Amino acid sequence: MSRTLFRTRIKFCGMTRAGDVRLASELGVDAVGFVFAEGSPRCLQPEEARAMRNAMEPLVDAVALFKDNDAELVREVIRQVRPTLLQFHGSEEDAFCRSFGLPYVKGIPMRGLDPGQRASQSTQLHLKYPGAAGFLFDGHAQGEQGGTGRSFDWTQIPTGLGKPFVLAGGLTADNVFDAVLTTLPWGVDVASGIESAPGIKDGDKMRRFVEEVRRADCHTD
């Protein structure tokens, strides 16, 4: 894909403070993510996320992230937080993900995969999650929480997906320029790479991350 007239979307995930949400909006990110996966250090209750949702500026999407949560909680989050996109990182099947009437992205753990599976993985993903609006490739292993800050071999991203994909896993302002130019993702997703502690975003890191993505978007060979 040519970089001409192409803009990489940016999602800041694992927000826990309204001030960080507001700064993310002011920096021009496309989406902020609220985590409801049990066991995550960034896990929120719906009421907490609702309060932070009110700090978002117009034209910024709210994304709700789940990992094997029950349907009742998902519906409660939708009612209170009003996300525009759902993100599932557990063993959820396509029918479950589609049942809430909102577009969804499926998180795919990339650590520990057999390198020989790359050629067939695209077909497998389409068969398993036909309703997915896109896929998010992350640096954790199957069964682990995301947001580990670990990257993976970008050459293992499946080819011929035919759907947008988001790159995550170990991204920081120091490597996202190369990540964007190497993989040409629809978007990038960062949590720990812009933090001083889990859930506590660092304003300078947030700014630098956005600057580096935009620098990659404007890069010409």
Image (cartoon, grey):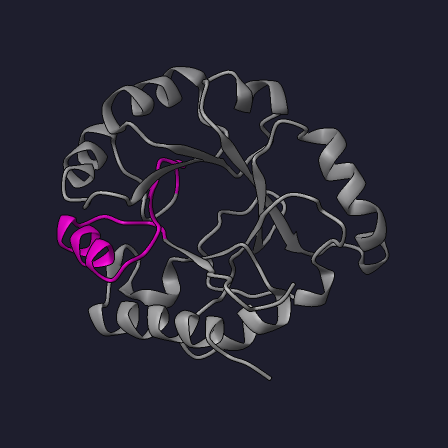
Look at 30% across and 19% down and name the residue there. 76
Question: In the displayed structure, does residue 170 sit left or right of residue 11?
Answer: right
Query: Does the magenta portion include 35?
Result: yes
Quick one: 217 or 165, which is closer to the camera? Answer: 217
Question: In the displayed structure, does residue 141 sit left or right of residue 197?
Answer: right
Q: Is residue 153 visible?
A: no
Q: Position of residue 88 (x, y in %)?
A: 51, 35
In the image, farthest residue toward the bottom: 221
Image vertical order of residue 99 relative to residue 42, above or below: above
Question: In the displayed structure, does residue 165 sit left or right of residue 32?
Answer: right
Image vertical order of residue 134 relative to residue 95, above or below: below
- Quadrant containing the N terminus in the rendered view: bottom right
Q: Position of residue 12 (x, y in %)?
A: 35, 55
Q: Is residue 1 visible?
A: yes
Q: Position of residue 7 (x, y in %)?
A: 46, 61
Segment tinted magenta in the rendering: 12-39
Q: Position of residue 219 (x, y in %)?
A: 50, 79
In the image, farthest residue toward the front: 5
Query: Does the magenta portion include 176?
Result: no
Look at 60% across and 84% down and name the residue there. 221
Look at 51% across and 16% down and name the residue there. 99
Q: Quadrant of residue 204?
A: bottom left
Image vertical order of residue 135 relative to residue 99, above or below: below
